Image (cartoon, helix red, strand yellow):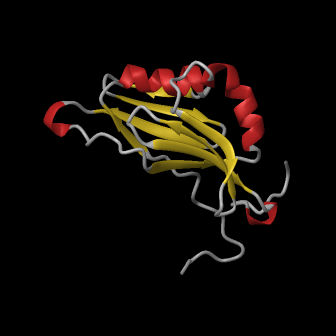
Amino acid sequence: MSNATPHSTPNFIQVTPFMFVEDLEKALAFFVDLLDFEVQFRASDYAYVHRETAGFRIWQQTGKDAAPPGTRRFAYYIDVYDVDRFYAELKPKLDLLPKGDVHGPADKPYGQRELLLLAPDGNLLAFGHALDKRYTPTGDSRT
């Protein structure tokens, strides 16, 4: 239940998940060189990358403090207006990735069209849009 009133100013900006990785440089190359994110902050073991309305907080952890390796499960989902346009933009770079690291774009039985990429942490990074544009997160049906 929300305490917001119709006249209140929204307070939420975006969700920025943490991605735990063993190699920060490899993760930054994935986001910057492949996905065209911008590094907005960088420390020795941490970086914040951002593109349009999506951000990731990437934290390098090694040894006993490291997160367990990914299991190719969905961990990150980015809603986009047109996944095919995003795929076309990235295709020359995606073609350089190992076979099996890219899936789609493909229509899914749960009503989404998705592009799946294997992220540096070993989990899947999904980009998608609703097949029925009435069900987009913003309610915006533009294509």
| In the image, farthest residue toward the left | 64
Query: In the figure, residue 44 lies in which quadrant?
Result: top left
Query: In the figure, residue 63 lies in which quadrant?
Result: top left
Residue 95, placed above or below residue 133:
above
Which residue is at 75% across, 48% downward?
81
Q: Position of residue 82 (x, y in %)?
A: 76, 44
Which residue is at 57% across, 58% downward?
12
Disc count in the image? 0
Left or right of 70: which side holds 64?
left
Depth check: give the residue in front, 116 or 56.
Answer: 116
Residue 46, placed above or below residue 126:
above
Which residue is at 76% across, 58% downward?
131
Depth check: give the residue in front, 36 or 96.
Answer: 96
The N terminus - image quarter: bottom right
Which residue is at 48% across, 43% downward?
124
| In the image, farthest residue toward the bottom | 1
Q: Position of residue 80 (x, y in %)?
A: 70, 46
Left or right of 100: which side holds 104?
right
| In the image, farthest residue toward the right | 142
Q: Position of residue 106 (x, y in %)?
A: 68, 47
Q: Position of residue 122 (x, y in %)?
A: 39, 37
| In the image, farthest residue toward the front | 99
